[in-house]
Image (cartoon, helix red, strand yellow):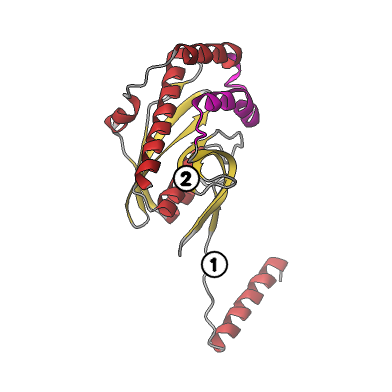
Amino acid sequence: MTKLELLKKNEELEKEILELKGIKQTPRIPTYQYSKIRDVDLEKIVDISQKLNKNRFNDWFENSKKLEENEEKFLEQLLEVEGEYLSLYSEENLKMRFLSPLLVKVDFKTDDFKDFYDEKLTYKNEKFTLTGEVDILISTGLRKAKKPYFFIQEFKRDEDYGNPRPQLLAEMISAVELNNWSEIKGSYIVGENWRFVILEKLGKDKYRYFISESFNSTKIDELKNIYKNLQFVKNEIIKMVKEEK
């Protein structure tokens, strides 16, 4: 008998002994890490589907935000210095050299909320646990994130876990459930390309989501739109926090 067969036999004997004693074993709840979750994992634990509807982003993308002269100059200079490297950077280089200056300029830091990096987030129900560190999170809180409003998921280089979309969706599901909301926004980045996402809760463990067209941050007009979209999110969160107060 091999070691694996022996372990399996022992588990079966332990189960039989517990059953004879009338002791019921509590089923183990599976835990999924955001950084490693895949589509097949997500579809195993929730009912989730993508819907195609470009109009779903109209209110978000067709915002009336007009860039100030200093904002336009900043974006042009940032692209001039970093544009050629965006598709080559590792995750940390992308964050430090490009994302950080961009997010500082958007300035998500207010008296009520701010941006958090590599923040721990956990959601648990009777069927599964979603947990891990979130790349970029806009949330209330001072030392620790308390109420998440928006997520930005960066690309990964790992061959097995290289798709940031299901990772972002898992984070958004966690936030919707923790906040008891019906909708939340987010974004994920692959190299120089940004996509924005809207997740809707339809019922118990049932969701649908919409993914925007791709915005190439190496093109100045599209980078300006990315910046405007983030500014829209910031102003939307300001309104939401005021209404909640």
Residue 178: % across, % down: 44, 54
Q: Which residues are magenta?
A: 84-110
**Residue 68 falls in which quadrant of the image?**
top left
In this rendered view, identify the residue nearer to me: 156 or 151: 151
Tag 2 residue: 148
Q: Amino acid at mark 2?
A: Pro
Q: What residue is rendered at 37% in x and 35% in y?
A: 236
Instruction: Pick the quarter of the image with the N terminus.
Output: bottom right
Tag 1 residue: 28
Residue 128: % across, % down: 49, 59
Q: Main secondary structure of the magenta part?
A: helix
* Helix, strand or loop for disc 1: loop
* Helix, strand or loop for disc 2: strand
Left/right of residue 178 with respect to residue 49 in the rendered view: right
Q: Which label sits in the foreground, 1 or 2?
A: 2
Q: What residue is rendered at 52% in x and 64% in y?
A: 29
Q: Amino acid at mark 1?
A: Arg
